Amino acid sequence: MVFTVRGRTVVVTGAGMGMGRLYAERAAREGAAAVVLWDVDARALEDVVAGLASSTAAVHSYVVDVASVESIQAAAGAVLNDVGVPDVLVNNAGIVRGKYFWEHDHRADIDLTLRVNTGGPMHVTRAFLPAMMERGTPARILNVASASGTLSVPRMSVYAASKWAVIGWSDSLRLELVSAGHPIAVTTLIPSYIRTGMFEGARGPLLTPLMEPDYVVDKAWRALLAGRARVQLPWTVQLAGTLRNLLPQPAWDVVADRVFRVYSSMDHFTGRTSGAPTQGKDDR
């Protein structure tokens, strides 16, 4: 039986703008009964709620700091009480820091990146999963990782580490749910750079241009509904991963640096400069 969101409840983290907003709009457009928006930015949430006013979905917004377990637990409790058990969970919120490792601040960079990017999806999923399992109906979880979680990238050591962990956790969770017999499919999204502003200044590696958000959301959404284990975008992400596993380290370093230009892709990174909060946005 084909899984759809029609008549179901969808929760999206980092829904205040960018791809998070696109996931929410897609859910409403495809007939979701309720769309639950989480973001750390209250004003951004208001804009998304206003944009979804004409949809038939009931829209619920919560200001949530996914770096805080307490904030996640409180918001999840409110959702379960006010809206009900989610059928679809999109773990999209994240942040990025692009600089040499020794330039990272202990708390504002290292600790925060790991708490948002790695701990966030884990704690959000943990807060909802028992209720989803107990209900026993088909459900979907999408975890947004990154191609940086499969390949080492200079000036992205902490970010890459956070996404490397997400990939391992997400796919392990998928296998655990299958083994335990729960009809909850987990999809891991592994994209290269996306043209959202979050990676402003970054240059796509060879044959890997910055992708448009609409394109990535469409591919991820279709994979989510189909229950696919992972989706890597574009095709060069999988190619690079294969070459990395086949070539000796010195050879791969030359290919990655001089051919694919992966190692210099963050040399001119600036990130968002609008002054908007960095957490809760779409993340690659």
Image (cartoon, rainbow, N blue to C red):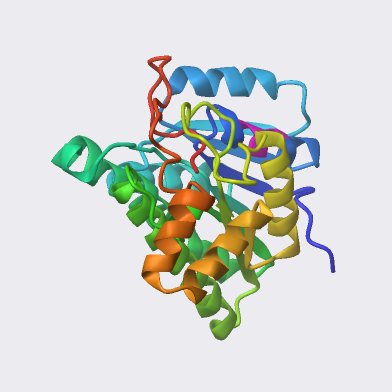
Residue at 41 percent across and 54 percent down: it is 163
Whether residue 226 sits left or right of residue 60 in the image: it is: right
Q: Residue 22 magenta-drawn?
A: yes
Q: Quadrant of the N terminus?
A: bottom right
Image x and y of residue 167, in percent: 47, 63
Q: Percent from the top left, x then y, of residue 79? A: 50, 44
Q: Residue 11 colored magenta?
A: no
Magenta stretch in the rendered image: 21-25
Left or right: residue 254 versus residue 136 is left
Q: Is residue 16 visible?
A: yes
Q: Is residue 29 above or below residue 11?
A: above
Q: Position of residue 205 (x, y in %)?
A: 54, 44
Horizontally, residue 198 falls left or right of residue 90, namely left
**Whether residue 202 is situated above or below residue 117 in the rendered picture:** above
Query: Residue 92: horizontal and vertical position, in percent?
Result: 52, 44
Horizontal placement of 222 versus 42: left or right? Answer: right
Q: Residue at x 26, y 41 (%)?
A: 112
